[in-house]
């Protein structure tokens, strides 16, 4: 079940996005899923990426998606844009808990999303919480573009929820 991200503003002119994803699996399985290339390839297909590549590291993955330009990015030339998604666990799994970072950036567009992730498992359900600062650095238009581009972020998180359940059915436990 996906809890829609809540948004709000801070004084530093970035938008804060919060989201909670829940999966019926152990913390170990969900930790592995979130850095699995198959999971990110499936997200790429769901967001209609024309290309998706992944590079894995210890407890991390970088996924690069070539996606159709949405309304928020219409300022850029071309019909597609490159979205880079970096997921990394920053702490080991201890007592069904761990922490990580998610960074999303778009090539040639002054926007970044930096999220702290926390993963917790209680009674066989693992919850992943994201608290993100989303910033578009375009003078006078930044806040308007943040609101529009936040929809793309919410679309990616919703895809992660749906695809997570599919991944668990195929690869879980």
Image: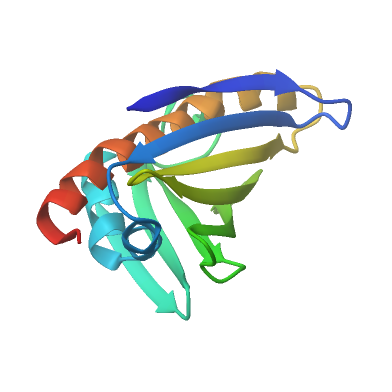
Q: Is residue 49 visible?
A: no
**Residue in the picture at 36% in, 32% down:** 158
Q: Where 64 sits versus 142, above or below?
A: below
Q: Residue furthest right?
A: 11
Give coordinates of residue 80: x percent, y percent: 37, 44
Q: Where 116 sits versus 74, above or below?
A: below
**Residue in the picture at 54% in, 28% down:** 150
Q: Please identify the quarter of the rendering in which residue 162 is found.
A: top left
Give coordinates of residue 113: x percent, y percent: 62, 44
Give coordinates of residue 79: x percent, y percent: 36, 39
**Residue in the picture at 71% in, 37% down:** 135
Give coordinates of residue 83: x percent, y percent: 46, 51
**Residue in the picture at 22% in, 51% down:** 42
Q: Where 67 sits versus 95, above or below?
A: above
Q: Residue furthest left?
A: 170
Check the picture and name the quadrant holding the C terminus: bottom left
């Amino acid at each position: 079940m996906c809890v829609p991200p809540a948004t709000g503003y801070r004084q530093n002119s970035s938008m804060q996005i919060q989201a909670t994803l829940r999966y019926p699996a152990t913390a170990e399985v969900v930790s592995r899923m979130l850095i699995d290339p198959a999971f990110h390839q499936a997200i790429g297909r769901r967001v209609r990426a024309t290309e998706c590549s992944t590079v894995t590291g210890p407890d991390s993955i970088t996924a690069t998606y070539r996606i159709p330009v949405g309304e928020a990015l219409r300022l850029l030339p071309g019909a597609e844009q490159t979205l880079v998604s970096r997921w990394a666990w920053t702490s080991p799994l201890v007592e069904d808990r761990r922490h990580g970072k998610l960074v999303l950036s778009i090539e040639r567009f002054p926007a970044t999303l930096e999220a702290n992730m926390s993963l917790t498992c209680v009674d066989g359900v693992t919850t992943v919480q994201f608290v993100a600062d989303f910033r578009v650095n375009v003078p006078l238009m930044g806040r308007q573009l943040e609101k529009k581009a936040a929809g793309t972020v919410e679309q990616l998180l919703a895809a992660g929820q749906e695809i997570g359940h599919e991944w668990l059915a195929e690869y879980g436990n």
